[in-house]
Amino acid sequence: MNLDDLYRGVIMDHYKNPRNRGSFEDDALKIELNNPTCGDRITLQLKVEDGVVQDARFSGEGCSISMSSASMMTEAVKGQSIAHALEMADSFSSLMKGEEADFGDYEDIEALSGVNKFPARIKCATLAWNALRKGIDTQRSL
């Protein structure tokens, strides 16, 4: 098995078995974004307390890249400070530019590194991360 096959497997696992898919019943911070180019849409909910992302959930519809990225992002940011979550979003942007990026113990995200070879798919991969940034900006303005 080569690296591309391994990465494809990780992406499909997150797509078929999404982590943190669903919604909170209470008043969690809610961000809705869509990609009008391809029709992907996401609703991200964040529970932030004392500057830490305590929990994250997402719902929506889209391609395997956008939904897998959302699954990976919600896994990665839970328990992280909002500052570190933003650093991770910046690292993901670097990854989409073909640059080196470090996600610490959460290596699944690196499976999306090949997306940068397909410029039309970069917006799919970054949708959830853009929702995260928007959510943190909203949280900071409250």
Image (spheres, rainbow, N blue to C red):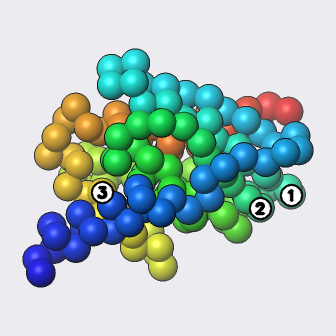
Q: How many marks?
A: 3
Counting from the top left corner in percent of width and height, residue 117 is at 14, 46
Counting from the top left corner in percent of width and height, residue 139 is at 77, 39
- Judging depth in this view, the residue of 85 and 114 nearest the camera is 114
Categorize mark 2 by other alpha carbons within 10 Å: few (<14), some (14-19), many (20+): some
Q: Is 51 placed left or right of 14 in the picture?
A: right
Disc number at residue 50?
Answer: 1
Identify residue type, mark 1. Answer: Asp
Q: Is residue 42 above or below residue 56?
A: above
Q: Is 53 placed left or right of 28 in the picture?
A: left
Which residue in the protein does label 2 denote?
54
Q: Which residue is located at x 86 percent, y 57 percent? A: 50
User: Which residue in the rendered view is the most extreme toward the left?
Assistant: 2
Q: Is residue 133 above or below residue 13?
A: above
Counting from the top left corner in percent of width and height, residue 92 is at 40, 52
- Judging depth in this view, the residue of 10 and 105 nearest the camera is 10
Counting from the top left corner in percent of width and height, residue 52 is at 76, 60
Categorize mark 3 by other alpha carbons within 10 Å: few (<14), some (14-19), many (20+): many
Disc number at residue 64?
Answer: none
Residue 54 occupies quadrant: bottom right
Looking at marks 1 and 3 on the same chain, the residue that comes earlier in the sequence is marked by 1
Label 2 sits on a secondary structure element that is strand
User: Which residue in the rendered view is the most extreme toward the front?
Assistant: 16
Quarter of the image for the C terminus: give it: top right
Q: Are marks 3 and 2 in contact (CB under 8 Å)?
A: no
- Judging depth in this view, the residue of 81 and 57 nearest the camera is 57
Q: Is residue 19 above or below residue 126?
A: below
Identify residue type, mark 3. Answer: Leu
Which residue in the protein does label 3 denote?
112
